[in-house]
Amino acid sequence: MAKTLVDEYNHTFPAVRGVQAGRPCYIAMCPMRLIPKIFVFDEDEVPAELRAQRVLNRSRIPEISEYLINNPTNYTLSAITASVDEQVHFEPMADTGPAVNIGMLTVSMDAHILINDGQHRRAAIAEAIKEAHELGHDHIPVLFFVDEGLRRSQQMFADLNKYAVRPNDSLSTLYDHRDSCAELARYVVANVGCFGRLTDMEKSSLSNRSTKLFTLSSIKMANRSLLRKSAKESVNEYEKELAAKYWNLVCQNIPDWTAAENKKISTAELRQNYVHAHGVTLQALGAAGADLLINNPKSWEKDLRKLQTIDWSRSNTTVWEGRALMYGKLSKARANVALTANHIRQALGVPLSAENKALEELIGR
């Protein structure tokens, strides 16, 4: 991008012209170092009814900025959408043929260019290039529309965000190759027999008719509980092997899982009748396992056999009501996971911490 030689008061972009909803639009590749200088954002002191964007959420900016800085050769940014508040000039490379829509887009420097979608990317780019100057030479696609007033800009914002759907946690875990905990989840599924056959890799919730018993996202959370990892902590090879070994032994000591793996019992029946067929118990098994590994480092493999003594039936309300169940329904609330884990700890012979003892007193156990 550079100023034209003819008129130094213009910005000139190599661009491709197209049409959306009968209106011309232009896509250009803009050097990221110029993004903060050219594209403005309605600051949040402007009343909402006079803006065409949401208020900038500054807590999102460091995360995007760090992503750019930490992955300078392997990041992806989607296009920014912007409106120009006056007519633009497009000079095609040819009068006929395919090149008629390839040319130079000229925008006056006096024009007000408003971001309709991508204000957080713009702010993050500005922060990132302060630390990683080389990023300023990279490009980001920008889709330009000619502004037709505030009403149209507000509608554009609504339309651009109305159908945006964030991928569910399982699908994100499946495709995320930067996240160590996501990699661990995939490793465990690949190396634990019953998980490999009974895990839905795409969905984060299972329908009543699903032939699967676990979700990839629930296995990720259970692994984090087992290894006591935060969302961004790394996982080493020993920890990966330990997790796979632990879950293989858990599978061996919950006969219903093995029966489902061998198709001797339906997963629907397990979900309907047993608490061990739900994410709350899977995460609780991870939390209880973390204490088992610490307290019984030499005997934990043998101790896991005691899982076979637990009555996992949902009809066993004396045990599970107030733990995995709340008024007869499964609950994945943090307190319910902890209370479910407490019962597993007690069955395995693992002492409760002071905090977990206090939880038991709260439910009168």
Image: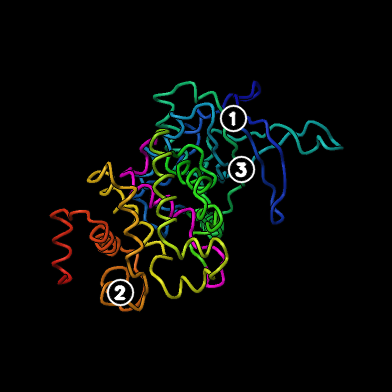
Against 126, residue 329 (above or below) is: below
Q: Secondary structure at mark 1?
A: strand
Contact check, label 2 and label 3, Cβ < 8 Å? no
Q: x, y (%) of residue 29?
A: 62, 33
Badge 3 is on which residue?
143
How far is mark 1 from mark 3, CA to CA?
Answer: 18 Å
**Span of residues in magenta:** 207-235
> What residue did someone put label 1 on?
10
Query: Three-letter amino acid code at disc 2?
Result: Met
Q: How far apart are the alpha carbons under marks 2 and 1?
A: 65 Å
Mark 3: amino acid = Leu
What residue is pinned by disc 2?
326
Which of disc 3 and disc 1 is earlier in sequence? Answer: 1
- Quarter of the image with the N terminus is top right
- Is-magenta flag for residue 213? yes
Q: Is residue 254 left or right of residue 291?
A: right
| Badge 3 element | strand
**What is the image's colouring?**
rainbow
For residue 236, above or below residue 296: above
Q: Residue sitting at 70 percent across and 31 percent down?
A: 104
Q: Amino acid at mark 1?
A: Asn
Residue 152 in sight in this render: no
